[in-house]
Image (cartoon, coloured by chain):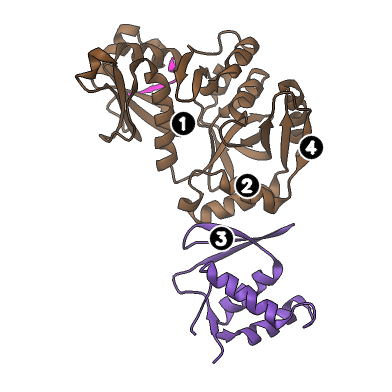
Chain colours: A purple, B brown
């Protein structure tokens, strides 16, 4: 069964889009991360639609950023989701 | 009434009894101490500060007390007590003033969470404030004091006190100068530096007296026009390096006392600063060269 991703209920993520990157505030611990547009879009998708699989998130991120599968393979997006999970920004129900 | 308007005997008696309440915007600080030497040093550095009625509310209540009884005769010490709590190990008695200054910084950083507190010196000219954020040892206090000697308004050598409005507020207290910086600033403003305390935990320390013109505007905030991360290296040629907003964001947030505590307000405030103000790293080995670069940066931000 594919993991389904969501932002933990106790978490609050805030974004500021600056000229050279996007800064993300993890309000649960007060931490700040500099993230790329792919990570920011993936988080936005998960915030808007909790419970999606990696494949579903991948499709929506490609649409939002106007990218192809070659530019952002599903495996890369899946790896990104696991990195975000290691930072406790998202969690899966698997 | 200013502290200097009270006679030295009166100041000493008041400190030993109900204390004196100093107005150091944005806070009021009640100070009590039976130590005669500390009373004289406090009057020396804070003589031009306004006093409140001792019955008025004070945000911070500090007592500078002699150390444990047995040690009073062998190696006398002083304790810093805030609201009945003793957060630090005692200092030697003749270092009571540096301990008061460091202790007040500590209390301010731990309590004033209505503001985002950047670890930064702040000066202002022509209505435009300049943040000089840096960790200890990078020369921010010396640079701020030297700019004050050159006519800039001095707001702080330690705290960028940023309100929700985005304005930076003064917390104009004596700047702690260390080692070689003491003579440098004394030459720029003879009489502008207080007594030297040798062999403190940070080396020789002396305090830069806040210029009267800056003290007269100690409650006036200013908009942030530019951010300069100072990097003093003896003998280094002047270099000015631009910083992109996201990099400046992380560096500013990392240089804050309470960024994690104030949460979203701090996050939005830092974003507002790096969006609106140019951010630079200025490496220098000569104060005059740094002054010129800083004047250009702030003028370019107009």
Magenta span of residues: B46-53
Residue furthest front in the image: B74
Q: CA distance from mark 3 to mark 1?
A: 31 Å
Residue B300 bears which disc, if any?
4
Instruction: Return the x and y of residue A7 as percentages of the image width and height.
Output: 52, 75
Q: Residue visible at 26% across and 22% down?
A: B67
Subunit under mark 4: B
Subunit under mark 1: B
Q: Which residue is mark 1?
A: B25
Subunit under mark 3: A
Q: Are marks 4 and 3 in contact (CB under 8 Å)?
A: no
* Number of other residues with Cα within 10 Å of mark 3, as a class: few under 14, some 14 to 19, many 20 or more: many
Q: Which residue is mark 3?
A: A25
Up-down relation of residue B140 to residue B181 (above or below): below
Q: CA distance from mark 4 to mark 1?
A: 30 Å
Residue furthest bottom in the image: A1
């Amino acid at each position: 069964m594919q993991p389904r991703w969501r932002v933990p209920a106790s978490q609050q993520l805030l974004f500021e889009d600056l000229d050279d990157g996007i800064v993300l505030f993890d309000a649960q611990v007060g931490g700040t991360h500099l993230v790329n547009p792919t990570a920011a879009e993936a988080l936005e998708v998960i915030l808007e639609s909790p419970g999606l699989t990696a494949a579903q998130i991948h499709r929506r991120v490609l649409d939002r950023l106007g990218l192809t599968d070659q530019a952002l393979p599903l495996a890369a997006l899946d790896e990104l989701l696991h990195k975000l999970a290691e930072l406790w920004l998202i969690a899966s129900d698997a | 009434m200013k502290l200097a308007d009270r006679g030295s005997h009166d100041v000493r008696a008041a400190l030993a009894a109900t204390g004196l309440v100093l107005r150091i915007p944005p806070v009021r600080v009640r100070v009590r101490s039976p130590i005669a030497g500390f009373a004289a040093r406090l009057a020396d550095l804070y003589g031009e500060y306004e006093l409140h009625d001792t019955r008025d509310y004070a945000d911070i209540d500090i007592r500078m007390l002699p150390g444990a009884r047995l040690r009073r005769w062998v190696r006398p010490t002083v304790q810093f007590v805030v609201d009945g709590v003793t957060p630090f190990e005692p200092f030697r008695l003749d270092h009571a003033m540096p301990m008061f200054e460091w202790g007040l910084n500590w209390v301010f950083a731990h309590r004033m969470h209505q503001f985002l507190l950047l670890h930064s010196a702040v000066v202002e000219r022509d209505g435009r404030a300049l943040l000089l954020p840096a960790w200890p040892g990078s020369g921010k206090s010396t640079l701020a004091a030297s700019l004050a000697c050159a006519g800039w308004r001095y707001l702080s050598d330690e705290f960028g006190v940023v309100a929700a409005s985005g304005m930076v507020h003064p917390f104009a207290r004596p700047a702690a100068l260390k080692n070689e910086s003491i003579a440098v600033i004394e030459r720029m403003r003879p009489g502008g530096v207080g007594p030297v305390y040798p062999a403190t935990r940070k080396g020789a320390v002396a305090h830069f007296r806040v210029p009267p013109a800056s003290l007269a505007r100690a409650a006036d905030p200013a908009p942030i026009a530019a951010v300069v991360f100072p990097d003093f290296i003896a003998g280094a040629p002047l270099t000015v390096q631009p910083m992109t907003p996201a990099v400046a964001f992380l560096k500013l947030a990392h240089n804050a006392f309470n960024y994690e505590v104030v949460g979203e307000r701090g996050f939005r405030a830092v974003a507002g600063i790096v969006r609106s103000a140019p951010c630079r790293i200025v490496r220098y080995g000569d104060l005059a060269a740094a002054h010129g670069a800083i004047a250009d940066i702030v003028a370019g931000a107009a």
